[in-house]
Amino acid sequence: MIKRYSRKELTDIWEEKNKYKIWLDIEVAAAEAMEKIGEIPKGVARLVKKKAKIKVDRIHKLENKVKHDVIAFLTSINEQVGIKGRYLHKGMTSSDVLDTCFNIQLLQSAKIIKKDIEEVLKVLKAKAKKYKNTVCMGRSHGIHAEPTTFGLKLATYYQEFKRNNKRMDQAINEISTCAVSGAVGTFANVDPKVEKHVAKKLKLKEEPISTQIIPRDRHAYFFSVLGIIASSIERIATEIRHLQRTEVQEVEEFFSKDQKGSSAMPHKRNPILTENLTGLSRLVRSYVVPALENVTLWHERDISHSSVERNIGPDATITLDFALVRLKNILKNMNVYPKKMLNNLELTKGLIFSQRVMIELTKNGFSREQAYKIVQKHSKNSWYKNISLEASLKKDKNIVNKLGEKKLMTIFDLKYHTKRINFIFKRALK
């Protein structure tokens, strides 16, 4: 991933030095197990830990020659360790190292992403409480529907990210396995006790059955969860972008003192951060399909998945981490305009209370069909004549006689739409 959308905490995980360090940890753990069961002489693991250093340039030079990354790595280690290095990797296959390492890198990334989600949850909860009773327009199809509160909007996102947090736990569990089962996964050349020791040492679970590789349905699940989280990010970003439109102006991204919005138009204050999140979310979701396609490999293994994972592993996790941190900061610093929200509520001159009028009419002898037709007629009259719905209704003697002017006035009360806010918050923010 390009530096512009990367944080060091994540990029460090995918640096080659960290990858080779994990490879070395796997080989040392395997050697320890082999020593315990008498497969190799005592002292090999200790010697490797003492003498072996990660030499990235040397590994690259060897790989250019032998055209095999694991062999190049082992050759580099053997050059430093000496003759006893020949016992490393006994009975193992490259995938034992590569797959176990890939899962560890995904886990290291996932733990940071999970912390990011928890930070987003904290901000969403605090902001939801702050704007709990800030009434604003609820929209369906982009059209004014009925009143809601800005706090309720944020509470829905809070619940969604709680689900994402749970999904992340499940995704972590899904890829927390290791395989040290040798060629085609039969354990013919490596004792299962070796895999058990490596798993315990690296805080992983043993893969119940591997076919030389760890099954890729696990990874498909992991990247699918990342894609869902990206969609949740975009949902919030899209809402903020809409609310920042000039015609709406209810919410906007924080705009710093020296910030410029346009090279041509000095007045512009654009929602660039949330637009950026929309783009990054598209990118993360684009990695889901190749992850799903990686599930189907030839026989016990092929390496068609390898080139895919070398790209999507770092890119998906680095991008999602960056997006979550950016989302947290946007939410934390966004400008909210309650007065503008109230102004927008009044734009349609009471049309947003049409359902309540209809309900009251049905309580007073009208069929639902009759009530709907009457209210729709007055709504059209209000819209085209630019008068309030209440004023239009008051001119209808049939309605006034049925409801009475006093009752008619009480229908147009915002508190009616917020009376169960406490109930929803108690259920959603626990």
Image (cartoon, grey):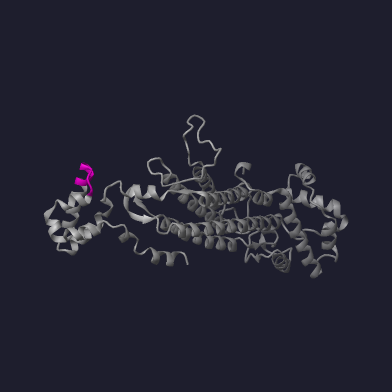
Residue 221 quadrant: bottom right
Q: Residue at x 31, y 52 (%)?
A: 145
Q: Is residue 410 above or below residue 305?
A: below
Q: Nearer the viewer, residue 157 or 55?
A: 157
For the question of whether residue 314 can be seen, the reply is yes
Q: Residue at x 63, y 48 (%)?
A: 7
> Main SS of the magenta segment?
helix
Relative to 319, is 32 on the left or the right? right
Relative to 258, is 195 on the left or the right? right
Question: x and y percent of residue 5 in the render?
Answer: 59, 44
For the question of whether residue 141 can be seen, the reply is no
Residue 386 highlighted magenta (yes or no) = yes
Q: Which residues are magenta?
A: 381-388
Q: Nearer the viewer, residue 253 or 15?
A: 253
Question: x and y percent of residue 21 in the render?
Answer: 75, 54
Residue 149 highlighted magenta (yes or no) = no
